[in-house]
Image (tube, rainbow, N blue to C red):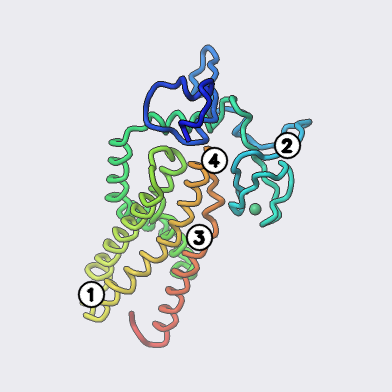
Amino acid sequence: MLSEEPPDNPSSIDPPGPPRQRAEDAQPPVQRIPGYTSEELARHSVFNELNIFPGRPNEVIQTDWSCSQCGYNLRGLMTGEKCPECGSIELFRPPPPGQISYATWYAERKKNASNLKAFLLLVVIVIAGGPFAVVGTFLSQMIPTFLGPIVVGPSIEEIMKISLILLVVETRPFLIRRQDEITFAALAGALGFAFIENLLYLKVYIPNPTLELEIWRWTVCTMLHVTCTLIASRGVIAVWRATDEQMRIPMVQLMYRPILIAIVVHGSYNAIVTLVGIAGFDF
Ligand SMILES: [Zn+2]
């Protein structure tokens, strides 16, 4: 692709380096305003804001641009038009080419992000994800409710297990290189959480647990945590991919459906185990 560019293409005057992505090549040089860093301007750009300016005519969306409710690609449609997939009206539109926006900020940060920093961050999340989720879940259990084990517990646990990697996706998405890193980090969070939870149940909460209970917790309960987190992590990946490919502010809405599925699966398991427990069988 690069060899097909005409010699007067602006990207051909860039300093030599690794080939950059298609969307970055489309960005003309970033403008400067005295007294502000380009990062400040990018973060406060009006082009990151809602598409509600009065008198602004609708236009054809010329780049890949997801519906922030369902992820459908709105390219080729008019701004202000209903999403053909879910019927909602997308409130953001792509920034005009050459204007400072989240896209210019993202492209610049991604270009300058250090591989070492990205790797170290992943290591920290992999190690800390599980303990972090346990602490958060503990704090949440200070509010007792009879729906706790079936609604509140699963909701909080499923959110907490992916919370560290989601924090990175929301604030430093340029430090993630591949979606596998998200899967890996979420998986580590789930395993770490399950490991600590199992130890708590088998060593602290339940005196003299049976061998069956120990096996049950280390197999079924652990698999449940991993499975639910893998479902939820698909949502985190959807958020990151839309940001990375379209260089726009992360849309957390895109993960609502996967996280809800994970919560329902987890809550259903808890409900079944609770009912069976009431019937006289102890897990
Ligand atoms: Zn939609």
Q: Does dot 4 land on a helix, a strand or a loop?
A: helix
State how far apart marks 3 and 2 are (Cα). Answer: 32 Å
| Amino acid identity at mark 3 | Pro
| Amino acid identity at mark 1 | Pro
Q: Residue at x 47, y 73 (%)?
A: 268
Badge 3 or badge 2: first in the primary sequence: 2
- Which residue is at the far top? 34
- Classify 10 Å Cα crowding around label 3: few (below 14), some (14-19), many (20 and above): many
Badge 1 or badge 4: first in the primary sequence: 1
Camera-side mark, 1 or 4: 4
Q: Does dot 1 land on a helix, a strand or a loop?
A: loop
Contact between labelled residues 2 and 3, with CB atoms less than 8 Å apart: no
Expressed as whole percent of the image width and height from the top left, the position of residue 93 reads 65, 38
Q: Is residue 258 above or below residue 78?
A: below
Expressed as whole percent of the image width and height from the top left, the position of residue 189 reads 33, 55
**Figure quadrant of residue 108:** top left
Taking depth in this image into account, of 28 and 227 the one nearest to the observer is 28
Q: Residue at x 63, y 29 (%)?
A: 96
- Classify 10 Å Cα crowding around label 4: few (below 14), some (14-19), many (20 and above): some
Badge 3 or badge 4: first in the primary sequence: 4
| Amino acid identity at mark 4 | Gln
Contact between labelled residues 4 and 1, with CB atoms less than 8 Å apart: no
Residue of label 4: 246
Residue of label 2: 59
Residue of label 1: 207
Camera-side mark, 3 or 4: 4
Q: Is residue 93 above or below residue 283?
A: above
What number is the disc on residue 151? none
Badge 2 or badge 4: first in the primary sequence: 2
Residue of label 3: 258
